[in-house]
Structure formats: structure tokens, C-alpha cells
Image (spheres, rainbow, N blue to C red):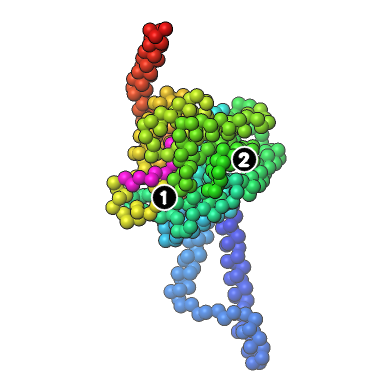
Amino acid sequence: MAARKLFRDYLAKRVSSSSIGGGARRYCSSSSSSASSSAAASESYPRIPHFSKRGRLLTGATIGLVIAGGAYVSTVDEATFCGWLFSATKLVNPLFALLDAEFAHTLAVSAAARGWVPREKRPDPSNLGLEVWGRKFSNPVGLAAGFDKNAEAVEGLLGMGFGFVEVGSVTPVPQEGNPKPRIFRLRKEGAIINRCGFNSEGIVVVAKRLGAQHGKRKLDETSSTSPVSGDDVKHGGKAGPGILGVNLGKNKTSEDAAADYVQGVHTLSQYADYLVINVSSPNTPGLRMLQGRKQLKDLVKKVQAARDEMQWAEDGSPPLLVKIAPDLSKEDLEDIAAVALALRLDGLIISNTTISRPDPVKQNPVSEEAGGLSGKPLFNLSTNILREMYILTRGKIPLIGCGGISSGEDAYKKIRAGATLVQLYTGFAYVGPALIPKIKAELSKCLQRDDFKNILEVAGTDCILCLQIFLRLYHMRILLSVNNEVVKG
């Protein structure tokens, strides 16, 4: 509706300016009595250039097409108009590739913050809806942390049709991050290398933004004239139509990582539908060491305690997840899985960017830049880690699959490998808003093709046989240990 209003205003201005221009020409032609009046007229009104016959015809034809197009657009249904808007972004998005990578990113966030992006009005396919952690997601496709670091564009991003959006990483104290340039495109490979280093405006600024958004939503709900009936399923969370995750980081110079994460929980958890402990960025020195068994266990315990000591409403405290790296050994994964199960962690995000350079990337000179690699070359590595972690956690913990997704088929493979939800970043940066409805439509067709009714039926189906074998070996291991204790006794 906003686009149509802008279009009508544009036409009104064109008509108004045409009337003024015509008046100017009449005034000039009738004011030839004196040189002074002619000079005054020329100063008061701009000179109107002379158009050729061909130019006038072309201008008239263009205006006619605009008017006709506007008239037609005003008659089509909202779903069709919405589809056109998303398709139109395919023409605009390539222009961002001409800009510096970080400037293009900043521009994209600003556009979403100001509502200069298409808004999804069409309902999601019914087979994509699911419930996780007691939260209802209209679809499992989310935006990963790192895009909207400072929670500037939550409403605009959720409005584009993401099932959930994760902001951050947010650090307690504002910090600039690493020196620029720090984001590098590898277009041919569909990848990006970044070494931003948790550039953040800090939790105070982010808390003010999220608080304002939360208050606005509550006001809208209170003043709504069409309340949701008890029989209707209400999707969304604290931020509006979708679920909001808040990704927490530590400051580069901080000596007490746990204190930084606890401060983030105390300040931001009231606005979050879920929280993420980011211990896997390769761009903050020493951060990945927190993924060790003892370090992670101590950290998670302190963060859980900070969350649980707070007062919560009926919907309870936000789930707590940990985001891990794709560059972990088998032993590292086993340790993380053991901690997650022992402490009843609510979920894991798999995975962050990689410090490795897979074969397709090695030939590109840009691959020599330091930082984490994301995008298509990360897909296989992160999916293998996802599958491994699903088996190690015995399918008991919700997993979010992240890394290299650029199609509905990619998202489907992540879900089959054990993911309950999936996240985009690099693919979205390259393709733009049009990728969101495309992935959802393709994912829905994948479910229909394989006779699955919903996402939860699909999650981990590629791991069932491996999981069964793992569980048998696990039980055998327990029996052997018990028998050994009996013999020793």
C-alpha cells in the first residue's frame, strides 16, 4: 500500500509540475511589452527547453505507460503486487556489487531499517510452520548474526519473510573491530571472507533499540481492532511477526569472558526469543579456546545461572544456544556434545565461518586474506559437522544449520542432516530479498516431493541409520563399563 501511495504522489507531482510549466510558457509569451518585465520573467521562471517532435512523442509514450502501469498495478491483488516487488530487487541488487563490500552492507542495513525493502504479504507454505522451544515459527528460514549487528533493521528484515532474525554479535562495550578493509568478496565462488572482529555499538545502544521496538509492538497489539481468536495460531515473538535471536560476544580486551556474556544476558535477554553464546568467531583472539570442554562447561553454567536468576513472565526465560566453529576435531565435537547434554543446553548453531580454504577457493588470490570464510565453499564442511553433532547429541537438542545455503535444496539437505532451523547470510548478501521467497517455495516442494508433512518429520532423516548404530555402540559401552566395575568389585 505504501508503494501505491508513493506512486500516486509521484503522478500528482508530475501533473502539478506540468501545470506550472505550462503557465510559465504562457506568461513568457505574453510578457513582451518591456525588456525589464521580460528579464523579470526570465529570472522568476526557469527556461523551458525545446523538445523535438520525437522527444515529445517519447515523453508522452513513457508517461502513458507509467499511468497505464500504475492503473493496472492498483487493480491487481496484493499477493501479485508483493511478488513483483521481490522480483524487482533482482534488478537493483547487482548494483550493490559495484560498491565496496562493507559500504554495500551498511547501505543494505540502512535500507531495511528505513523500510525501503519489499514486505512479504503472502502467507508461508503451511508445511513450513513448526514449533521449537515453545515458539511458533512460520517458516524455518532465518537470517544469521553478523548482518544486523546493532539491531537497526529488525522490523524490516522480519517483514521480508524470514522466520527469524538473529542480531549481533553484541559486545558489552562499544568497539570498532579490526581495521578496514575487512570484508572481501569471492564472487566466482559465491563466498565472502571477513575479519570484522565484533564491531559493535555495545549493549546499551542495542538495548535502547530493542526496547523501543518492543514497546511499539506492544502498543500496536493493544490498539489492534482485530484480535487473534483462540483457534488461530499466532506466529512470532517479542520483535513482531517473526522470532528474534540475540547473539552475544565478548570484548577483544576483556579478561573475563564469562562476565561479558553475563552482562549481555542481564541487559538484552528480556527482548530476545532466544540467546546465543558466540565462542566461535575466528576474528577475536582466544575466543575459540572457549569451546574446550572445561572452558565451555564453566561458561555455560555461569550464563545459565545469570539467565535463571532473572524474573520471567509466563512465556519463561529465553532458550540458550551456543554457536560453534566448523574447524573442530572429532574430540572437540564429542566434548561439546557432552557439555550440551549434561547442562541441557537448548540448542547449537552449526556453524560459524571457517579459517580453512577449501579447494574451489584456494585458486583465488583473495583467499590469502585473513579471516573467516562463508558462503558456498563452506556448505559441505558445515553440513558434515552438523550431521556429526546430530548423532553425538542423539537428536535430543535442536540444531540450527548455517553455512553455504543458497537454495531450497541446500536448506533441505541441512534439515535432513539434523537441522531443525536454517540460517542464511552470504547467499542473501549476493542475491538479495528475492532469495527468501525462492528458498521457502523450493523447500516446501522438497517436502512434498518426498512425502513429508512438515519440517520436524524431515530433521535428521539422513542420520537415522548412523544414529541407531551409534546408540547401540553407546549402550554396549555402558554395559561393558558396568560389567568391568562388577568384576573389579
**Quarter-of-image position of residue 316:** top right
- For the residues labelled 1 and 2, say whether their Cβ atoms are less than 8 Å apart: no
Q: Residue at x 35, y 18 (%)?
A: 473
Q: Is mark 2 on a helix, strand or loop?
A: helix
Q: Residue at x 56, y 38 (%)?
A: 258
Q: What amino acid is at disc 1?
A: Gly
- Residue 152 visible to an observer of this rendering: no
- Magenta span has 296? no
Residue 218 vs residue 426: left or right? Answer: right
Q: What amino acid is at disc 2?
A: Gln
Residue 35 vs residue 408: left or right? Answer: right
Magenta residues (range): 349-358
Q: What element carries label 1?
A: loop
The residue labelled by disc 1 is 371
The residue labelled by disc 2 is 263
Query: Depth check: 303 or 60 in front?
Result: 303
Query: Depth check: 178 or 97 in front?
Result: 178
Task: Report x, y in % for residue 309.
Answer: 65, 30
Is 451 rendered above or below residue 191?
A: above
Screen quadrant of the C terminus = top left
Is 181 rendered above or below residue 406?
A: below
**Marks 1 and 2, the one that precedes in the sequence:** 2
Task: Report x, y in % for residue 467.
Answer: 37, 22
Q: Residue at x 56, y 50 (%)?
A: 200
> Farthest residue toward the front?
488
- Residue 365 visible to an observer of this rendering: yes
Within 10 Å of disc 2 (Cα), the crowding (few <14, some 14-19, many 20+) is some
Q: Residue at x 46, y 36 (%)?
A: 291
Is 446 rendered above or below residue 180?
A: above
